[in-house]
Each structure stands twice: as structure tokens, then as C-alpha cells.
Amino acid sequence: MKDLIKGHILSGEFDTAYRLMSEVDFLEFEEHFISAAHEDESTMFYTFILDCIKREETNELHDLAFLLHVYPYSDHEGAFHTAYYHAERSMILTEHKEVKSLLQMLLLHAIPEPLLTDKQAFDLSKQILKLDPENKVARNIMKETAKRMDQVVVDFSQLSKFNNA
């Protein structure tokens, strides 16, 4: 299936790829799609997703776009910011009640240059734990961010140096 998806998308046969996507389990399609995109990092894969979103915007399509940008496209400039956009749209479409969507956003706190502050990651972890009290990722992020937020100490003597400058 991976080769079929790859062939249709790279040839611009989006209607055929769309039909294939609608005929199989979406998670199976997602797996083959991401695998095909790993082999050939063509922007046609993203163009296909945008075309699908134009037809009908769903959280699944935004999740797929997110995966595309954090895995095959992660080295592309702006990939994580695009992933952020799609994670946010997925959260909105699921009314912040889908753990997968929330975890995607939380992942953007764990990248080398995080797109979320510790406070945002802490709050997101809290939200995830309300939906899934046993979620280990959210528990770990909550612990880490709580420690860092508690370690913020303001040295007022250092601040006075700036006033005298």
C-alpha cells in the first residue's frame, strides 16, 4: 500500500489517493503514508493533506500533517511551527478532549527549541491527566516543569544593577 500511496501522491493523483484513504482504516493509511514520506520527502505529501483538508477538515488530517512535520519533514525550516499549527487545529476540532491531540502539542515542548513554555506544558499535562489519569508522559512532563517553575528565583540585587545602568 505504501508504494500505491507514494505513486498516486507523487503523480498528483490526489483523487485516487483520497479514494484509497477513505477505503481503508485511517491508522493503516497513516502508517503507510508517513513511511512513504520518509522515503521521498516531497512536499507533494503535504500538498495532498492540504487538498484533503480543503475537502473536509478533520482532526485526523491535522494529526497526519503534524506527524509529517515532526518526522519526515523535521529537518525542514519551520517544520515544528507548522506541526504546532496542526496540533492546535486538532485540539480545537476535538474540543481539547482527545488525548492524542493534546500529546502531540506536548511533544513540541520536548524538542531542542521548545515551542511551549513550562507553564503551557504543565497546564497541558494537567488537561491530559484529567482525561487519562495514568498517562505517564503527562505525569513526567508535569513533574519536570513543576520543578523548573519552582526553581525560578529572582535575585533583587541583580535587578538593581540594571536600574543603575
Image (cartoon, helix red, strand yellow):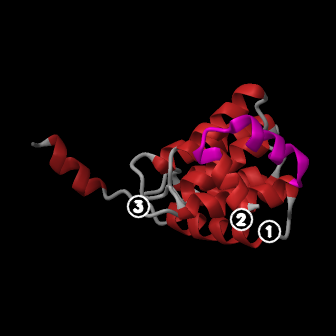
| Residue drawn at (31%, 59%) of the image | 155
Give above or below for 30 relative to 61. Answer: below
Mark 1 residue crowding within 10 angstroms, few (<14) / some (14–19) / many (20+): some
Cα gap from disc 3 to disc 1, whole angstroms: 30 Å
Mark 3 residue crowding within 10 angstroms, few (<14) / some (14–19) / many (20+): few
Q: Position of residue 112 (x, y in %)?
A: 43, 64
Identify the image quadrant of residue 126.
Answer: bottom right
Disc 3: which residue: 153
In the rendered structure, which segment of residues is drawn in magenta?
9-25
Disc 1: which residue: 135
Tell me which label, 3 or 2, sits earlier in the chain. 2
Q: Position of residue 118 (x, y in %)?
A: 54, 56
Question: Label 3's element?
Answer: loop
Disc 2: which residue: 138
Tell me which label, 3 or 1, sits earlier in the chain. 1
Q: Is residue 20 magenta?
A: yes
| Residue drawn at (47%, 66%) of the image | 151
Q: Nearer the viewer, residue 72 or 101?
A: 72
Q: Amino acid at mark 1?
A: Asn
Give above or below for 103 relative to 59. Answer: below
Identify the image quadrant of residue 138.
Answer: bottom right
Cα gap from disc 3 to disc 2, whole angstroms: 25 Å
